[in-house]
Each structure stands twice: as C-alpha cells, then as structure tokens.
Amino acid sequence: MRKGFIVTHRDSQSQARLGLILTPHGPIETPAFAPVASQGTVKALTFAQLEELGAQVILVNSYHLYLRPGIELIERMGGLHSFISWPKPIISDSGGFQIYSHSPLAKISLDGVYFSSHLDGQKIFLRPEDVVNLQLRLGTDIMMVLDYFVPYSAPFDQHREAVSITSLWAKRSKEEFKKKETTQQLWGICQGGTFSDLRRQSLEFLLKLDFDGYALGGLGLGEPKTELIKIINNCVQLLPEDKPRYLMGMGYISDILEAVSQGIDFFDCVLPTRNARTGTLFTSHGKIVIKQKKYAEDKRPIDEHCSCYTCRYFSRAYLRHLYERQEITSSILNTIHNLHFYLDIFRKIRQSIASNSFGSLKASLSEADKEKEE
C-alpha cells in the first residue's frame, strides 16, 4: 500500500475530521490513539488481546530498542514487525523525550546528543541522521525526527535554543531520509513551549521541509489548559490540510476532545496502561482507585456501561483483591479495561464525526474527565 494521508470527512460544526493514514501494514483510521509499547510490548497484554481491543497501531521507542535488544538483533529477526509478531502499523518515537526525562544523563550539542545509558552508564552518541537510520532498520511505518525540548517553565531563551536545535536536526533528518527508497513515513516535530512566535517559527521551518506528517511536541508538561488550547489552535491554522497532525503524549480525555475539535488526528499516551497497573480505572462516571476499601464487597463491574472482558466477568471486589495481593492478573484485567475505554472513545469520536454529531459527543464525554472521581 502506498503511503500518504486522505481526509475522508469533515465535521460540519467543528474542525474535527476523519482520515486515513496509509502505511505498508494497513490504513489507520483517524482520529486514532496509539497504545504505548516502548519496549516492543504493551505492558500486561499480549498482541492478541490488543487486536481484540481494536488497536490499530502501537508506539515503540527507538532509543529503548537500540539499547535492548539492539537494532542488529531485530534486523536478524526480520525487522520489528516480525520480531514482536505485530502485523499492524507501528510508529516509532525518536528518543527526544528521553533527552528530556533523562536530562542529567544527556548532553546536547548541535551535532547530536550524548547519552549515558540509564541501564549501565555506557556512553552513547546519536546524531539525528543516526536516529533516522535506526528507525529505517527497525522497519516501523511512521518515524519521528530527533527533537529537543525544555521544561514548560524554562525561560524564553532556552525555548528559542531548543527550537533552533530541533529545526537543524529536522533538516538533517529529512536530508538523510531522502537518500533512501522506502514506503516508511518521516514526521517532523514542532517545539516552542507556549510561546506562539516560537511555535510559528518552528512550524514554518518544518513546512518547508515537507514532512509526511507534523507533530506538536513539548506539551502536557504543566502549562495551563488555556495555554495548551491556544497553542493547538494557533498551530493547526498553519498546518496543511493534506498531512496528519499528531499531538504527542496527550492522554486526558478532555484534552483529546478539545484537540480533535481543532483538527488533530493522532494521539498517544501511557496514561491508560500505566494507571491500570497502579490501580486507577477509568469509567463513564469518572475514575476509580480500586485499592480503596469501599470496593472490598462491591459486586458491580468497573463500569456497568462497559462491554470489555473485565467488566463482563469480574467485580470491583475481585479486582481490588487482585490488586491488594499484587497478582499479575490485576495488571492484565485493569489494562484490558482501560485500553478498551480509550479505544472505544476513539471509535465513538470517529462515528460522531461521520454523523456530524461530534459536538454532542464532546459534551457528553466531559463526564469522563480523568481528574474526576466516581
């Protein structure tokens, strides 16, 4: 299948849109959510379970896979799809977030990034060209350029430097990518914190390079909700209609709904899977912290309106028991529910856009805000 992106329908009351991202491993219907599988697995689930839940695409991390098990081994095993036995599309992150999250272990230069491995302290140097080639060798369908961002609270000068470095790396990444004949896609990442001028500068530079898709990075890091919405709105106005738009790392349902209404197509976040493992479950009435004593004899499912395997067969009381006993089954059943909850919301989002009723769905789903407790 050829690569590309097609807009198939636009909501009549907002900027929300339906689309298809075309990849060698099948199309991705958008708006779409990618469960995070950094190490080549969605924690606590098999890929059979993930397919049953309706996942269209997963997100892996090229930095983590580079460290373990190593790109050479994955190549010998036939590429990442073959190695992990996942037949559908894969998007790979570049390691830019690891520069941020492992900042004491990373040193930035114009040429690339120096890492001290968080595993054993091994010294690693990666240029943006290296990161493109790592992802090409993995065989992922969508690859992200190496980017650099700083905390939301950092001063303007630091954000400006991050935009400058990200732009330089994006140019070098695209030049390296153009040397290859591949059906894989390379997406650029916009940075600039909450500074509108920097975001515009970043995007205008990326647009000249003509990437296959465009991501907004460095958000969801503590900025006020009003600033987040403003930045998304400003950026979308600059983005081309015929390329997919990706809001990186955004997981709260209220933020996702707002972003979809402004024309964002693609999302990922660890929120549903990580929270499942720590006993926080999402429902149509708000979140449940299953370890609480009030659920010790609660015969109800997590969500009486949910059709997932966990809700069809198990009570809150049993799920609390599993969590308290630290049983592996706790993580499995909780993750099945949380991912079903997220993927079902995205199914409803796509259906509502198709029927020009997204505004009504957005209003009704406000009750599922992740900050609210049942």
Image (cartoon, grey):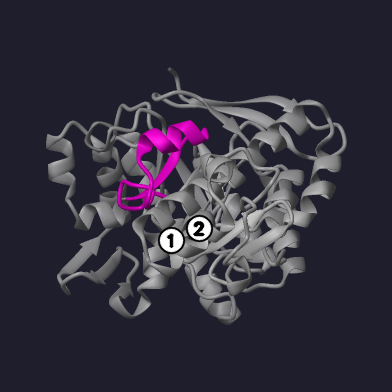
Report the residue at 31% width, 46% height from top. 40
* 48 in magenta: yes
How far is disc 1 from disc 2 in space, using C-alphas?
Answer: 5 Å
Q: Which residue is mark 1?
A: 322
Q: Which residue is mark 2?
A: 319
User: Residue 227, image x and y in percent?
Assistant: 73, 68
Q: Look at the numbered disc 2 and give the secondary structure of its residue.
A: helix
User: Residue 113, image x and y in percent?
Assistant: 30, 66
Q: Would you identify the image quadrant in which residue 359 lies?
A: top right
Q: Amino acid at mark 1?
A: Leu
Task: Classify 237 as above or below 252.
Answer: above
Task: Classify 84 as above or below 169.
Answer: above
Front in this rendered view, residue 254 or 317: 317
Front in this rendered view, residue 372 or 1: 372
Front in this rendered view, residue 272 or 34: 272
Residue 239 seen: yes
**Which quadrant is home to the N terminus?**
top left
Report the residue at 72% width, 55% height from top. 368
Identify the residue at the far top of this view: 1
Report the residue at 37% width, 66% height from top. 326
Report the residue at 75% width, 53% height from top. 233
Q: Look at the numbered disc 1 and give the secondary structure of its residue.
A: helix
**Which quadrant is home to the C terminus?**
bottom right
Front in this rendered view, residue 88 or 371: 371
Q: Amino acid at mark 2?
A: Leu
Query: Which segment did they paint magenta?
Result: 36-61
Q: Do residues under tags 1 and 2 come within 8 Å of each other at their CB atoms?
A: yes
User: Residue 153, image x and y in percent?
Assistant: 59, 80
User: Residue 335, image x and y in percent?
Assistant: 47, 51
Which disc, if any, is residue 51?
A: none
